[in-house]
Image (cartoon, helix red, strand yellow):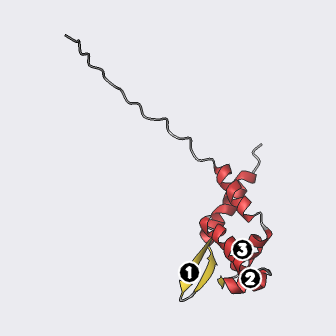
Amino acid sequence: MEKVTATTTTTTSPPSPPPPDPHRRLARLLSILADTVRLRILCVLASGPAHVGLLAQLVGTSGANVSHHLSVMERAGLVAGVRSGKYVTYVLQQKQFNELVEELQKVMVVQV
């Protein structure tokens, strides 16, 4: 006759992830803005909404290139596209941009 023993398994929760590093997020956003075409697009959008064709003309590059850069900035939450018929008008996400500036100011403050 075989002896059967009961085993108990204990489960432990995995450790909590570390809190998000604000420097990492800021570095990611700054790396997105470290491109001259993106900075030009951002400057144009700071003065008001614009569609890809106008942005391409004002920035001095192709519409395809502008669309690529807008896509990167849209994923980062810096700009948003609003569709109207067959056109998409892009706007600066002012709140997100202001938060970026505030975060940068906080990091740049040297505490003595």
Residue 13 percent location from the top left of the image:
42, 34
User: Of circles 2 and 1, which is in front?
Assistant: 2
* Residue found farthest to the front: 1
Residue matched to label 3 = 42
User: Of circles 3 and 2, which is in front?
Assistant: 2
* Residue found farthest to the bottom: 85
Instruction: Quadrant for the C terminus, please.
Output: top right
Residue 8 percent location from the top left of the image:
31, 23
> Disc 1 versus disc 3: distance between alpha carbons?
16 Å
> Disc 2 versus disc 1: distance between alpha carbons?
17 Å
Residue matched to label 2 = 56
Q: Specify the amino acid type for callout 2.
A: Ala
Q: Specify the amino acid type for callout 1.
A: Val
The mark nearer the N terminus, 1 or 3, is 3
Residue 28 percent location from the top left of the image:
68, 56
Residue shown at 67%/82% (left/top)? 52
Residue shown at 80%/69% (left/top)? 36
